[in-house]
Amino acid sequence: MSTVTLDHDADHGQRGVIRAFVIGSIVGCVAVFVVFAGLALVAGLGTPAAVGIGLLTACFGGPGFGGMVGAVLHQSRHEDT
């Protein structure tokens, strides 16, 4: 017969990283959209083209960059020293 003990604190850390990744992804999408759509407008493209470029770069670049930054910031704040 074996005894299983649950460590609830270990699971809380994993949920925190996932939450930070999701929030970072959302912030990254918005930031990348604003930057690239704005750059396209400044470059002289029309509004539909600028929105299209902003959406494309936000979908591909935002979650990767924002998610990584969010997770790294969370890990660096909760690192055991």
Image: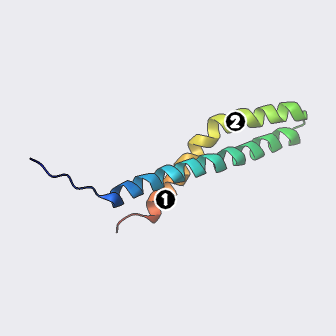
Q: Is residue 67 left or right of residue 60?
A: left
Q: Tell me which amino acid carries mark 1.
A: His
Q: According to the image, label 2 marks what residue?
A: 57
Considering the image in quadrants, where does the C terminus appear? bottom left
Percent of width and height locating residue 45: 88, 33
**Circle count:** 2
Foreground label between 1 and 2? 1
Determine the secondary structure under disc 2: helix
| Displayed quadrant of residue 51 | top right
Write the residue at 87% across / 42% down.
42
Q: Is residue 68 left or right of residue 47?
A: left
Name the residue furthest left: 1
Determine the secondary structure under disc 1: helix
Mark 1 / mark 2, whichever is N-terminal:
2
Residue 45 appears in the picture as rendered: no
Percent of width and height locating residue 6: 27, 55
Write the residue at 53% across / 53% down.
20
Frontmost residue, 72 versus 18: 18
Write the residue at 83% across / 38% down.
40
Percent of width and height locating residue 53: 77, 33
Where is 11 relative to 41, above or below?
below
Residue 12 appears in the picture as rendered: yes
> Rounded to the nearest whole Å, what is the CA distance between mark 1 and mark 2?
25 Å
Write the residue at 19% across / 52% down.
4
Residue 74: assigned label: 1
Near mark 2 (Cα within 10 A), the count class, few <14, some 14-19 or many ≥20, is some
Q: Is label 1 in contact with label 2 (beta carbons under 8 Å)? A: no
Q: Is residue 53 left or right of residue 63?
A: right
